[in-house]
Image (spheres, rainbow, N blue to C red):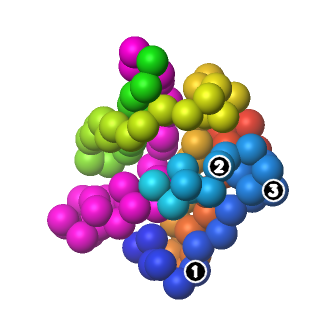
């Protein structure tokens, strides 16, 4: 699941999510699957929150099994436009796709 060779992004992600955040979200999934791939759900959900003036909190969640992890990274002004967004990463067995919730 979430094979590194078959990963795709939508036009919305390509145009609106900075590449460093795209890579960071894939890394979060990679860390989770490296720990125990059997407990990783096919749907990973990411939300964002600004903490103070220089920290971005990224919440990664899934339903089965119910799990939530919060990751922290440096905040940059260009992240303002994604603070209210939700991002899905869906694995269908053949490939993984990153998309904004409104693109689903």
Q: Is residue 85 visible?
A: no
Q: Which residues are magenta?
A: 25-52
In what element is the residue under mark 2?
loop
The residue at which mark 3 appears reads as 11
Element marked by disc 3: helix
Q: Residue 95, how many percent across, how many down?
A: 58, 75
Residue 42: in magenta span: yes
Mark 1 falls on what kind of element? Answer: loop
The image shows residue 65, relative to residue 74, as above or below, that is: below
Query: How many residues crowd mark 2 within 10 Å: few (<14), some (14–19), many (20+)?
Result: some
The residue most toward the bottom is 5
Where residue 35 sits, quadrant-wise, is: bottom left
Looking at marks 3 and 2 on the same chain, the residue that comes earlier in the sequence is marked by: 3
Residue corresponding to mark 1: 6
Whether residue 92 is visible: yes
For the residues carrying marks 1 and 2, which lies nearer the camera in this image? 2
Mark 3 surroundings within 10 Å by alpha-carbon count, few (fewer than 14), some (14 through 19), many (20 or more): few
Q: In the image, what residue occupies the spot 34% across and 37% down?
A: 72
Depth check, mark 3 against mark 2: the one in front is 2
Distance of mark 1 from mark 2, alpha carbons?
20 Å
CA separation in Å, label 1 and label 3: 16 Å
Q: Which residue is mark 2?
A: 18
Q: Earlier in the sequence, mark 1 or mark 2?
A: 1
- Where residue 14 appears, x then y in whole percent? 74, 56
Taking 51 as reference, is 6 above or below it? Answer: below
């Amino acid at each position: 699941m979430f094979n590194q060779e078959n990963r795709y992004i939508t036009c919305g992600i390509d145009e609106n999510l900075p590449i460093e955040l795209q890579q960071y979200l894939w890394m979060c999934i990679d860390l989770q699957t490296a720990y125990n791939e059997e407990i990783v759900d096919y749907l990973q959900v990411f939300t964002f929150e600004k903490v103070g003036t220089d920290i971005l909190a990224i919440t990664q969640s899934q339903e089965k099994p119910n799990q939530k992890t919060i990751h922290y990274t440096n905040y940059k002004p260009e992240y303002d436009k994604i603070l209210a967004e939700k991002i899905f990463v869906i694995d269908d067995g053949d490939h993984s796709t990153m998309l904004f919730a409104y693109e689903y």
